[in-house]
Amino acid sequence: MSGPRDLNGRPVSRTRWQRMTARLGRAGEEGLATDDPELVNIVGSLDDAVSSATLLSESAWEPEQQVVLRHLLVLPTTRVAEAVAVAGLDGYAAMDASDADRDWAATAPMFGGPAPAQSELVVLGRVQLIDAMHLSQERSRMASLGSRHGGVALGWQVWQRASSS
């Protein structure tokens, strides 16, 4: 996924002038990809009750910059493909779970230990701008997706390029 995304994760249309200047290497914003090696985990949580606004305000999050919003879900193995397909309708894609810190997710308090048998950790991510309200909406959307597919949303993570300052 290249190009800027809005608060709902949808591609932002560029004007003709923006497209032309981007081709010339001026005034163009370099697109962010979900697998960008420069991304760092800015903030995240496994706690359903924690306020998105509180965590974002206490983090190094830069509101004007695109982020990769990742959701960690534990789903029955037989329902993973279906859940990923449904999430794909909103621009989410399955990501490599190894860099989502498996130990962190696998020891979620709701399980009191490792994830249940015949289930797997699924990481869904997309590029977008965020604010506290839209982050809360996406958290709710993923909780619903997990529930509808027999699993749970463990938590979320916001990944952003490290600040240059």
Image (cartoon, grey):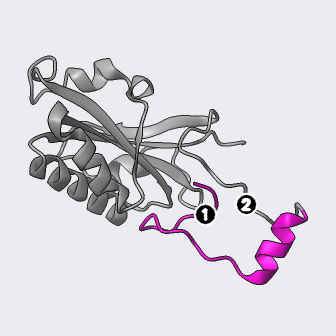
Q: Is residue 142 left or right of residue 123?
A: left
Q: Is residue 76 visible?
A: no
Quadrant in the rendering for residue 104: top left
Q: Is residue 112 magenta?
A: no
Sequence-wise, the earlier of marks 2 and 1 is: 1
Q: Which quadrant is the C terminus positioned in?
A: top right
Residue at image position (64%, 61%) is: 3
**Residue highlighted by disc 2:** 29
> SS at mark 1?
loop
Left or right side of 130 for 29? right
Outermost residue toward the bottom in this view: 16
Tell me residue 57's x, y (percent): 42, 51
Q: Which secondary structure is most common in the magenta stretch?
A: loop
Q: Which residue is mark 1?
A: 4
Looking at the rendered structure, which numbered label has been put on residue 124?
A: none
Q: Is residue 120 left or right of residue 25?
A: left
Going by the picture, which residue comes out furthest to the right? 24
Residue shown at the point (35%, 64%) measured from the top left: 134
Q: Residue at coordinates 38% horizontally, 28% vertically from top-left?
A: 97
Vertical relation: 159 (above or below) 130: above
Residue drawn at 56 percent across, 53 percent down: 62
Residue 113 visible, this orientation: yes
Crowding at dot 1, Cα within 10 Å, few <14 / some 14-19 / many 20+, comes out as: many
Q: Quadrant of the N terminus?
A: bottom right
> SS for tag 2?
loop
The part of the chain drawn in magenta is 1-24
| Figure quadrant of residue 71 | top left
- Closer to the camera in the image, 34 or 60: 34
Mark 2 crowdedness (10 Å alpha carbons): few <14, some 14-19, many ≥20: few
Between 49 and 140, the residue placed more toward the observer is 140
